[in-house]
Image (cartoon, grey):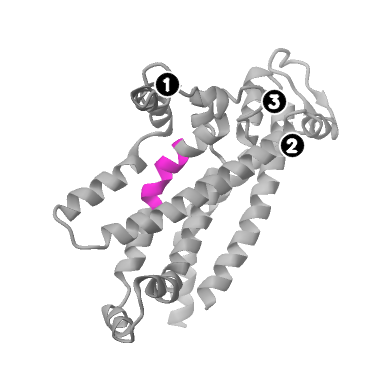
C-alpha cells in the first residue's frame, strides 16, 4: 500500500513538468502541421485558405529540394568523419602525460563554447578570406594563389567550420572513455608482445566503440539543424551549392514570405530527422547491449 502511494505521489509531482514539456513540443508541431495545409503568405496575411497538399508538392518540386537533402547528408557525414577521427587522435594525444596537461585540455575544448555565428564570422573574415585571411597569407608565403574558399569550395568550407566547433565535444567524450580503460589490460597486452597498432585495433577501439556511437548519435541530431554558419558565410550559395534543408526552409519562410510552404518543408524535415534518429537509436541500442 505504501509503495503504491509513493508511486502515485511521484507521478503527481512529475505531472506538471511532463504536461509543460508535452505542450512545448506538441503545440508548435501542431501549428506547423496546420499551416502546412494552408495557403498563407506574409505579404497577404488576411487571405488564408486551405491548400491541401499543394505546399508539399511546391516544396518537393523546388529545384533546390534534392540538392538541399544531398548537401545536408554530405555536411553531416563530412563533419562526423572529421570529428570522430580527429577526436580519437586528440583523445589519444591528451591521454598521454605532458606538461601543462590541464591547460592544453581547456584550450582544445574551448572552441565548443564559441557561438556558431561568431565562429563563422571568425573563419570567414580572419582565416578563409582570400585577401587577408590566414590561409591566404600561407598561400602567398609559399608563392601560391590564395583560394576563395566560400566561392570555390562553399560546402567544404562550412564542413570545416562546423567540424572545428564539434571536434572538442567528440574529443571530450572519447577522452573520458579512454581514461576508463584498465591499465592492467594495457600492461597485459604489452607483455604479450602486442605493438601500438595492435593495441589500438584490438583493445582501444572496442573499448571506445560505445563512446563513438554516442558521439555520432548526438552530433547527428544537432548537425541536421545547422543553419547559422551557412547564413553568415555563403547564404546558401553560390546557387544552391551550400543550401541544406534548414536553410531552404528559412529561405522559403523569411525570404519568400511563404509560411505554408516553409511549414510543409518543416514537416518533411521532421520526418527525415525522425527516420535518421530511428536507425541511429537502433544502432546505439545494439552497441550498448554488447
Task: Identify the residue position indicated by label 1 in the image.
Answer: 129
For disc 3, the marked residue is 259
Distance of label 2 from label 1 (alpha carbons): 29 Å
Give the distance between the C-alpha atoms of the residues marked 3 and 2, in whole angstroms.
20 Å
- Percent position of residue 45, x then y: 71, 16
* Relative to 236, residue 112 above or below: below
* Mark 3 nearby-residue class (10 Å; few <14, some 14–19, many ≥20): many
Q: Main secondary structure of the magenta part?
A: helix
Of labels 3 and 2, earlier in sequence is: 2
Is 267 or 238 nearer to us in this picture? Answer: 238
* Secondary structure state at the residue bearing disc 3: helix
Magenta segment boundaries in residue numbering: 161-170
Res 164 quadrant in image: top left
Q: Does residue 30 appear in this view?
A: no
Marks 2 and 1, the one that precedes in the sequence: 2
Question: Which class describes the residues within 10 Å of circle 1: few (<14), some (14-19), or many (20+)?
Answer: many
- Residue at screen point 54% across, 35% down: 156
Spatial separation of the CA atoms under disc 3 and disc 1 = 35 Å
Q: Residue at 62% of width from left, 66% of height from top?
A: 282
Q: Nearer the viewer, residue 235 or 33?
A: 235
Q: Which residue is mark 2?
A: 66
The x and y percentages for residue 42 are 68, 17
Q: Is residue 168 magenta?
A: yes
The kind of secondary structure element at disc 1 is loop
Amino acid at each position: 500500500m505504501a509503495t503504491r502511494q509513493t508511486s502515485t505521489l511521484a507521478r503527481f509531482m512529475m505531472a506538471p513538468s511532463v504536461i509543460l514539456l508535452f505542450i512545448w513540443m506538441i503545440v508548435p508541431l501542431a501549428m506547423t502541421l496546420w499551416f502546412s495545409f494552408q495557403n498563407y503568405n506574409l505579404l497577404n496575411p488576411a487571405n488564408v485558405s486551405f491548400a491541401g497538399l499543394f505546399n508539399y508538392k511546391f516544396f518537393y518540386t523546388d529545384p533546390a529540394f534534392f540538392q538541399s537533402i544531398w548537401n545536408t547528408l554530405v555536411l553531416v557525414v563530412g563533419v562526423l568523419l572529421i570529428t570522430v577521427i580527429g577526436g580519437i587522435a586528440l583523445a589519444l594525444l591528451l591521454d598521454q602525460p605532458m606538461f601543462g596537461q590541464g591547460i592544453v585540455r581547456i584550450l582544445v575544448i574551448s572552441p565548443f563554447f564559441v557561438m556558431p555565428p561568431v565562429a563563422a564570422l571568425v573563419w570567414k573574415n580572419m582565416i578563409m578570406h582570400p585577401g587577408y585571411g590566414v590561409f591566404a597569407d600561407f598561400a602567398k608565403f609559399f608563392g601560391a594563389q590564395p583560394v576563395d574558399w566560400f566561392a570555390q569550395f562553399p560546402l567544404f568550407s562550412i564542413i570545416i567550420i562546423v567540424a572545428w566547433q564539434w571536434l572538442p565535444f567528440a574529443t571530450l567524450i572519447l577522452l573520458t572513455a579512454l581514461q576508463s580503460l584498465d591499465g592492467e589490460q594495457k600492461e597485459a597486452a604489452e607483455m604479450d608482445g602486442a605493438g601500438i597498432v595492435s593495441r589500438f585495433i584490438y583493445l582501444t577501439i572496442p573499448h571506445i566503440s560505445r563512446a563513438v556511437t554516442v558521439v555520432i548519435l548526438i552530433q547527428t541530431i544537432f548537425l541536421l539543424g545547422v543553419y547559422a554558419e551557412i547564413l553568415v558565410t555563403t547564404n546558401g550559395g553560390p546557387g544552391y551549392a551550400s543550401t541544406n534543408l534548414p536553410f531552404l526552409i528559412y529561405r522559403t519562410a523569411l525570404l519568400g514570405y511563404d509560411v505554408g510552404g516553409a511549414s510543409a518543408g518543416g514537416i518533411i524535415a521532421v520526418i527525415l530527422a525522425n527516420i535518421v534518429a530511428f536507425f541511429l537509436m537502433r544502432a546505439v541500442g545494439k552497441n550498448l547491449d554488447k
